[in-house]
Amino acid sequence: MGLLSKLRGEFIDIIEWTEPAHNDILAYRFPRYQNEIKNGAQLTVREGQTVAFVNEGQLADVFTPGMYRLETSNLPILATLKGWKYGFNSPFKAEIYFISTRQWTNQKWGTQNPIMLRDQEFGPVRARAFGSYAFRVSDAAVFLKQLVATDPSFETYEIAAQLRNAIVSRFVDVIGSAKIPMLDLAGNYEKIGSLAREKIAPEMAGMGLAITQFFVENISLPPEVEQALDKRSKMSVLGNLDQYTKYQTAEAIGDAARNPGGMAGMGAGLGAGAAIGAQMASALIPGPSSHGAVGAPPPLPQAVSYYVGLNGQQAGPFDMAALAARVRENAVTPTTLVWKQGMANWLPAASVPELQSLFASGPPPLPGT
């Protein structure tokens, strides 16, 4: 320090500190030439600040926001330590610390490793969590003794790791003892945050700090567990197969309306919806149980019956066995007209593929018949 600065310090003594913008300083030691302070010096403590005087390593007086003229009357502890019985007139030495008591917001916390929890529904699970918190210096004297010590500029990064570890440790205790099911955690973030803040408070108080806000932003499960939950949710949604098929049909119609392919697109969508519905329906048909029961079989196919034209009159209907008997009796020949449900017209028996085998072993018709 130059001579001019030294002389200026002998005649004018104004002690104040204006925090620079975008700073992270929690405690700042006011620089003085040889730590000398004039009698009657003016001290300005702004809102969000506390000032502590330290004499030879021992905490003396603490000043809250306001403007002070430093005299024996407002420095009672320092006066006792210095042995000023009748006041003082000469400069004295003391260290002055400005401590920021404002709220420090948007501080981050999170679990570096998964937390092992026992869930009522899923059993043992691993979860991660993260969020933010806010804190401030609640007791400047304790903060100065426990953390600052002789640091001329104590910043938030110097304590961030310690706070984060303490917060995560207490948070694990809270979420482990809360016994809240994993699927209900999202609706209880505020409750968990309040419990965690109460749990952390005593440890913070031991450092002269207070957690003013604590937020849980997310508690998540491992990706493979979340995928299993997604599948479970899909199955719950698709539980009503009839509704699912109707939904797929409606979607296909909408897609067809927007697709230049028109009916082709709609047909594909309808087919996909029906196929998926049929697949899921068949998967849900109960199989063999422990008692040997099986699902009901499909209905037996209906026997095919034919009407036959005999002697210019309709006869029947006859099933395949009855027709075979009449073929053997030569009552029904390959040229005999037959008809069944679904045929448009009467046809010769030999021209019906299903009946051709009845005439394979018989002799051909006589010539001229």
Image (tube, rainbow, N blue to C red):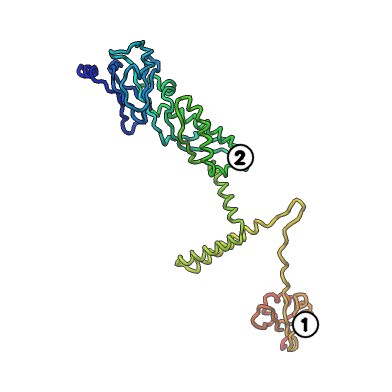
How far apart are labels 1 and 2 at the CA level?
A: 82 Å
Can residue 326 be seen at all in this image of the molecule?
yes
* Front in this rendered view, residue 10 or 127: 10
* Front in this rendered view, residue 145 or 246: 145
> In the image, is residue 345 above or below residue 277?
below
Q: Measuring 75% from the left and 78% from the top, which residue is drawn there?
A: 318
Q: Quadrant location of residue 313?
A: bottom right
> In the image, is residue 215 above or below residue 39?
below
Q: Is residue 203 left or right of residue 238?
A: left
Which type of secondary structure does the marked residue at label 2 adopt?
strand
Badge 1 crowding class, 10 Å Cα cut-off, few under 14, some 14 to 19, many 20 or more, is few
Q: Measuring 48% from the left and 26% from the top, which residue is drawn there?
A: 205
Q: Earlier in the sequence, mark 1 or mark 2?
A: 2
Residue that label 1 marks: 330
Closest to the camera, between mark 1 and mark 2, is: 2
Identify which amino acid the numbered label 1 is placed on: Asn
> In the image, is residue 246 above or below residue 220?
below
Quarter the N terminus occupies: top left
Quarter the C terminus occupies: bottom right
Which type of secondary structure does the marked residue at label 1 adopt?
loop
* Front in this rendered view, residue 353 or 218: 218
Identify which amino acid the numbered label 2 is placed on: Asp
Find residue 346 and report its horizontal and vertical position in percent: 67, 83
Q: Measuring 32% from the left and 13% from the top, which residue is drawn there?
A: 87
Residue that label 2 marks: 119
